[in-house]
Image: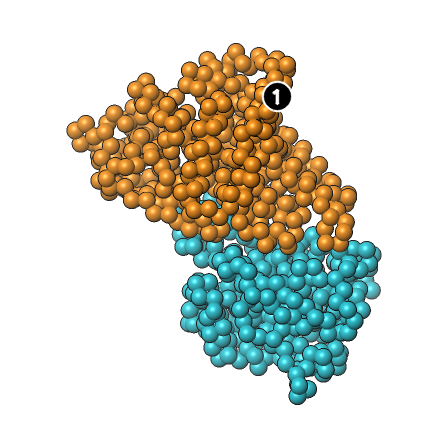
Amino acid sequence: MGGVGAMTSSVADLDDLRATVRAWCRANIPAGWRAAQTGVPDEQYVAFQQEWFQQLRSAGYAVPHWPAEWGGGMSAAEQIVLYQELAAHDAPRLVLAFVSIHHAASTLLAAGTDEQRKRHLPAILDGEIWVQGFSEPEAGSDLASLRTTARAEGESFVVNGQKLWASGARYADWCLLLARTDPDAPKRRGISYFLMDMRTPGIDVRPIRNAVGESHFCEIFLNDVVIPAANLIGPRDAGWRVAQETLGAERGMTMLELAERLGNAGFRWLVEACSRPGPGGTRPIDDALVQDRLAALETEIVGLQALCRGLVERHDAGTVGPAEASIVKLYYSELLQRVMDFGVEIAGLAAHTQLTKAQSSGWESGAWVLDFIGSWEWTIPGGTSEIQRTIIGERGLGLPREPVAGG
Amino acid sequence: MNTELSDEAAEYGRTAQRAMESAGGDDLVQRAEREPDRRESLVGPVLAELGAWDLDPRGSADELEAAAALCRAAGWWALPYPVAERLARPVGGSAEGGWGPDGAGPDGAISMDGLIVVSAVGPAGPVAGLDRRWAAVGLDGRRFRAAPRPAAEPPRRSAFVTELDLEPLDGGPLDLEPLDGGPFAVKGTGGGRADAALGLVLSDWTLLGSLDRAIALTRAYVLEREQFGQPLARFQSVQFQLTDAEVERAGLEELAKYALWSIAIGLDEALDDALALRLAAIEAAETVFRVAHQLHGALGFCDEATLSWISRYSQPRRRLPVGRSATQDLLARSLGRRGLTGPFSEVWA
């Protein structure tokens, strides 16, 4: 029970931790990494991410949210201190390992066998990269209608189908895969959850180019891919429930870091941008309207930080409500869009000439136009804002379920 | 007051939209992005065939309306060409003066191919790589000769926008300092306020065409895309988002007609009306594209989706010459406590 003891951390303990993290950041964050990571080929980005992950790992900062026995053990309060300092010192983000240390790890911890955990959790610490294979061309918001099939054959399953929007699939070693094992069951009951080795024959990954010219979205084509039955996670045909239970809360948990980044990096840069004299010689921050907007945004960010902290603490205590993660995701994604929108406005036309941003930076990088376009993405993946609102309405407020076609 | 486009102008717009479709439609912008040097030859023929350069938007209300309808059709396809800027080209020796003789060629005839409305700070326009002679007009009415710099970025990133070097035509030094204590000033002494109004309004008619398209694409997508066993369009939350976007677009259309009428009858405050239209266009574009992207999901950000192209190439029209805050500031300074005249001023005059 890593988090529980630490939840009682005294203020003095937190101050000590802050001083330690701060000293570590000063000594270890590579100077000039932004310039060095701008416009680099993919291999250099991957190598830099792996190197940075190992640096954080050796300090004990890579997976603070994991249980102590697996290498984590920080309380919510301690994680907040860590994330605040990393953001304030402009540390690179763990982009490549995001799915590995959050979604894969939480799935393994909550539903995996001992063997699966021992196989993968240490490997993730050694740099094993995971991708999520959930969405399909005909199964986006309506994920449960997915059509990829997994047919049992002896001690294995043979998988056929197509996955879409698998971010980072090109670099992935393993995939969290949802596939239909019982085509005759009601759609949520016939799905199983697999751990799929991306080196298995029959897997074809193709990048999709997006509006800012990047290709982190991928399609994964699966053609007679053989997965050993031992790589089933949770019971057969119970994949939908397992995914809901393990990932719903996890989606909220990942927000702790993102909220602190928004507060300690994104908002700070916004204030700096407002403090620079514009073309007319005046500073936006001296304008009462700008001050009002900044104050309103800061209020919202503080609210988000409080929501995230509450979510993590209630998750640790086992008292998290059914809609809390959705509230946090909805609030963060729309707030991020508002902050970036204002950043574009303040940065003005000059911002439109800054058309590259450093790989390994967060959703806020200071390249306001790219950050703004990137922020639009946030209200879509991991459950669109419409899906989050439906969850909040139905599970949080207990409102009637939306009528579904055909009853 | 009748702000409706004439039947002829509306029909001309429909003809233009069909002709652009025959010439390649959505493929035109994709080809131009791959081969930026060819963009003039890709779209030049169809525009010439439509008689685009025979239109004289400064000459008569009918031709002004036809020009607006043509810009709207260009916006529908994100046509990779500065149609609005070409149509707004200055006319030499006009009654207003100012474009000649400085803007005229050696034979005394005007020799500008187009007009770009610019901000005094960071002047730029979507005119990269075209072998044309450009005039520019500031939002304070000052006129310039504009020389586009070579494009610093490929069109994928720049949407054909390039920076301009300006040389004053109205005499006096090129003064890029702020006037009236603000970042910009509308009450300048330059004689080109009517030019600025025309340039802004034609650009906004182009943007209107892109919003028409974004709504049409999104409507078609939510009717076709099925999730939870039914088209997305059956969900009321989806319907409401699309209707909110359509209300914005429809409001913009009315304002665009009004601002065009204001130019056609030569109202003194045509530039104020153009700025008001501009502000409405920026705000409507934000709502419409936000909704269009949200309802398209991840697909909307990919090259496979037409929306992605329309959205990317709408950016210059939304950001240039100045963005929302600066437009708001300009409009507020220009109006002071006077307010807009508006279509029904006689009622309370």
B1 in relation to B54, above or below: above
Which residue is disc 1 drawn over?
A19
Q: Colour of chain A?
A: orange
Residue A314 in picture, x, y percent from top left: 53, 19
Judging by colour alone, the chain drawn in cyan in this rendered image is B
Callout 1: SS? helix
User: Is residue A114 at all visible to an observer of this figure?
Assistant: yes
Residue B315 falls in which quadrant of the image?
Answer: bottom right
Q: Nearer the viewer, residue B4 or A295?
A: A295
B338 in relation to A33, above or below: below
- Label 1 packing within 10 angstroms: few (<14), some (14-19), many (20+): some
Specify the quadrant that holds the C terminus of chain A.
top left
The number of callouts visible is 1
Residue B8 located left or right of residue A278: left
x 32%, y 18%: residue: A114
User: Is residue B208 at all visible to an observer of this figure?
Assistant: no
Residue A271 located left or right of residue A128: right
A108 in relation to B149, above or below: above
Residue B190 in picture, x, y percent from top left: 77, 70
Under mark 1, the amino acid is Ala
Residue B277 falls in which quadrant of the image?
Answer: bottom right
A36 in relation to B68, above or below: above
x 28%, y 27%: residue: A232
- Given the current orientation, which residue lies at the most extreme left position? A154
Residue B290 in picture, x, y percent from top left: 55, 49
Residue B256 in picture, x, y percent from top left: 64, 64
Residue A201 falls in which quadrant of the image?
Answer: top left
x 69%, y 62%: residue: B119
